[in-house]
Image (cartoon, rainbow, N blue to C red):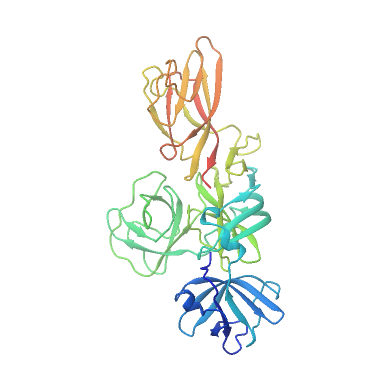
Amino acid sequence: MGKIVTLAQMTVSGTPGTGVITLGSASTGFQSFAAAGVNNGDVISYSIVDGSNFEYGQGTYASSGPTLTRTTIQGSSNAGAAVSLTSAAIVAVSALATDFYSTACLGAFRNLQASATGTGANITETFDELVVENASNIYQILRSGSLTSSLATSGANGIDNSAPQTVTVTIASPGVFTLNGHGFPLNAPVVLATSGALPTGYTAGTTYYVTAPTTNTFQLSATKGGSAINSTGSQSGTHTVASVLAVSSWYSKWVIWNGTTVAGLLSSSTTNPVLPSGYTHKARTGWVYTDSSGSKYPLSFVQFGRRVQYKVAASSNVAALPTVASGVNGSTSTPTWVSVSTANFSPPTAAAIVVVVLGANSGACAVAPSNAYGAVNTGSNRPPVVGYVQAGSQINISQGAIVFETANTIYVASDNASNSVQCFGWEDNL
């Protein structure tokens, strides 16, 4: 969103053409940008009229000159490109339609759908409308989108590993990597490169997994859920980190835009994918999870809006719903609850998980969002999702959605070896 002020309109100095605009004086009856409250470095929404030509968008104001640099052109009489301005051009600070989209609208969508077959690397996605944002918090509504991304390629419509990011390494036990706003979640797969030598403990080109992530730092493990690697020795050169394709790993799914072309992007980062050259706007639209085979295909799924469901198909990599927990866990009568991670079944930003609970052979199986619930046969405070067979060899199946009270964690109590909890899907916090 560009800064908006009141009654700010100015002439231009010289003939700006398509380049940086040097501003002249305030138009009669208007204020200069500075007098209206525009400060050095502010991004403003502007409109330009030059005879029968027009242009509008966002630009960055500099008090020296003063000048206006056109950063995002939203429309013009020159087919959306910069108008070659003459000395007669008039530049105004204007409220544009996109200025009325609040930050809450980022990622807002209408009829967002996506899917993967589980038999290839492709992910298809369509939407009627989607709001994307650039680094200056300027929004754009994309309409009638249809795209295909692939885990088998890099850059636009592929993985964001075509432009690795520079990272610094603190030699310690364990070693600490610093990259401001990296967005890597726990167990995100990454690969290192260097122009010199990495500290002892790390090898360029090897897949590592993020552990102990904070806003600006992270550590690395050789395996998912493993211990952080200690670093020793010395280092030289410039080090970089990038997303890498790995088995059984989550990749955030994005729609990106370069002012003309809509594309997809897949990333190990939750919040900060590396945009291909020329792309400026983005919105996260979901996640995919790779299978454990050498192909590393996305698991078969269908998505409608925030709801995602595993799609079972005999010929795909989801021949049956994935099992989150099975057998005896804790006690259903005491009760004793066992904390179970769903990190391999629901993504880092999931708000809820949909479970299928099977109770069998005179047994019971219960699922809850915390350990604050009572026994399955209690008169009050019963668990929200229960599969319960009082007697005999029958099977009882229940389905329910659990909103996470602790990220990617559910609580299970089960008293029979044949019981199980499966993941049917999740709801994403888009």
Q: Position of residue 64 (x, y in %)?
A: 45, 84
Q: Which residue is at 36% across, 18% downward?
A: 334
Q: Position of residue 254 (x, y in %)?
A: 57, 54
Q: How many dots with numbers?
A: 0
Q: Locate residue 91 relative to residue 177 in the image: left or right.
A: right
* Foreground residue among 210 and 400: 400
Residue situated furthest front in the rendering: 29
Q: Position of residue 291 (x, y in %)?
A: 55, 43
Using the image, determine if residue 371 lies above or below residue 304: above
* Foreground residue among 395 and 142: 142
State the image quarter where residue 25 is shown.
Answer: bottom right
Q: Which residue is at 64% across, 86% downward?
A: 88
Residue situated furthest top in the rendering: 391
Q: Which residue is at 70% across, 82% downward?
A: 51
Q: Visible in this render: residue 155?
A: no
Q: Visible in this render: residue 95?
A: yes
Using the image, determine if residue 259 lies above or below residue 152: below
Using the image, determine if residue 195 lies above or below residue 139: below
* Foreground residue among 100 and 280: 100
* Foreground residue among 324 and 200: 324
Q: Locate residue 355 relative to residue 380 in the image: left or right.
A: right
Q: Position of residue 117 (x, y in %)?
A: 65, 43
